[in-house]
């Protein structure tokens, strides 16, 4: 095939699309850090899939320009890595940081989770380098180009890699959020992947799903006492770092279904409240589950992840909370 053949461009297009599909989380986070360097933000958000699903950044008007660094299964260690990188590289001073917590977050260490730690070599090691090993010290970085097929005899790797990264980042910069035309909440949700619609399940089926997820998963994290101790230090260090940089700190918990709330271990919430109250700096805390009757099953994709309808509601509540807090200053 000659370079005058239009098929040459089709091959490049195919490689770019394949690159983004295989490196979506890395490309998204990389794009958001680039946005912070080039444009800056008034507010940064860190957290897991709950905030990734639950916030529509463009509707969080009280927070000004918002950049979210949340992806599925992210823990406090990587939250803090994002915070440090964002503050150090910021085009302009960041005013506030919103930190999403799940009830079990203080007991969660991604690097020790055999089910989800694959994010580390494919995403975090490519963004943060050696700092991202955490407690998985023998993890090996996965080259983003390693899963992209192209004719290496025709296209130099550095050319294809540059084009793939440039295209992927700019697509996600235009999108401005994790979700958009290329990826929807439904397409990556656990039930959605299994072609199961939460809205079509019976009450008993929803309850069974929530109980299995919580009793056989989330509640078991409370046994991880060493992780809890380390995360307590990480959280304290992160808050101290933010305050040293004159950044207001908000902690928030997204809403969950009644099925989830009926079985989640209540000691988690008690521990979070005590931990935040014991910090040497004042922080804000907002648990949307304290607002009884605000959310219905129709706002969720599963027992604890919001759909777009629910995300509009949650974003409005978070926006009102910021207005309430900062209006008092």
Image: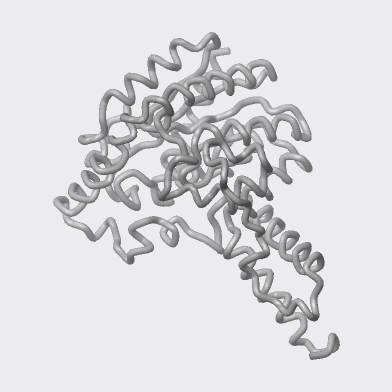
* Quarter placement of the N terminus: bottom right
Residue at image position (57%, 47%) is: 139
| In this picture, residue 144 sits left or right of residue 47 | right
Q: Nearer the viewer, residue 291 or 111?
A: 111
Residue at image position (71%, 57%) is: 170
Query: Which of the 4 quarters of the picture holds residue 278?
Result: top left
Q: Is residue 312 in view from this perspective?
A: no
Q: Is residue 33 in view from this perspective?
A: yes
Q: Nearer the viewer, residue 329 or 95?
A: 95
Q: Against 149, is 29 above or below?
A: above
Q: Outermost residue toward the front?
A: 138
Q: Nearer the viewer, residue 311 or 223?
A: 223
| In this picture, residue 87 sits left or right of residue 50 | right
Which of the colour schemes (rainbow, by chain, secondary structure, one colour) is used?
A: one colour
* Quarter placement of the C terminus: top right
Return the x and y of residue 81 as percentages of the image width and height: 62, 34
Return the x and y of residue 108 as percentages of the image width and height: 42, 34
Label count reads 0
Residue at image position (19%, 47%) is: 207
Q: Nearer the viewer, residue 320 or 241?
A: 241
Return the x and y of residue 87 as percentages of the image width and height: 70, 30
Residue at image position (35%, 20%) is: 271
Query: Which of the 4 quarters of the picture holds residue 228?
Result: top left
């Amino acid at each position: 095939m000659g370079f005058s053949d239009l098929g040459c461009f089709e091959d490049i297009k195919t490689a770019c699309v394949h690159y983004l599909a295989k490196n979506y989380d890395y490309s998204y986070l990389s794009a958001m850090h680039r946005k912070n360097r080039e444009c800056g933000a008034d507010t940064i958000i860190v957290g897991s899939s709950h905030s990734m699903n639950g916030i529509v950044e463009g509707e969080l008007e009280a927070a000004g320009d918002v950049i979210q660094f949340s992806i599925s299964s992210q823990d406090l260690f990587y939250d803090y890595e994002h915070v440090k990188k964002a503050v150090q590289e910021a085009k302009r001073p960041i005013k506030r940081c919103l930190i999403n917590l799940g009830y079990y977050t203080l007991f969660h260490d991604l690097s020790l989770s055999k089910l989800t730690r694959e994010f580390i070599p494919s995403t975090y090691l490519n963004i943060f380098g050696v700092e991202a090993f955490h407690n998985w010290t023998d993890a090996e970085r996965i080259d983003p180009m390693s899963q992209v097929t192209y004719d290496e005899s025709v296209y130099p790797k550095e050319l294809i890699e540059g084009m793939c990264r440039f295209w992927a980042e700019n697509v996600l910069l235009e999108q401005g959020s994790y979700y958009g035309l290329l990826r929807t909440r439904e397409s990556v949700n656990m039930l959605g992947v299994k072609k199961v619609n939460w809205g079509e399940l019976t009450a008993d089926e929803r309850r069974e799903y929530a109980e299995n997820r919580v009793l056989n998963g989330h509640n078991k994290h409370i046994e991880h006492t060493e992780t809890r101790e380390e995360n307590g230090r990480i959280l304290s260090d992160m808050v101290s770092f933010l305050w040293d940089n004159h950044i207001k700190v908000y902690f928030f918990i997204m809403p969950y279904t009644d099925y989830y709330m009926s079985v989640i271990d209540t000691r988690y919430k008690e521990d979070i409240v005590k931990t935040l109250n014991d910090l040497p700096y004042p922080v804000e805390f907002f648990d949307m589950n304290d607002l009884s009757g605000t959310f219905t099953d129709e706002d969720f994709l599963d027992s604890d992840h919001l759909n777009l309808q629910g995300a509009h509601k949650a974003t409005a509540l978070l926006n009102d909370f910021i207005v309430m807090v900062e209006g008092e200053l």
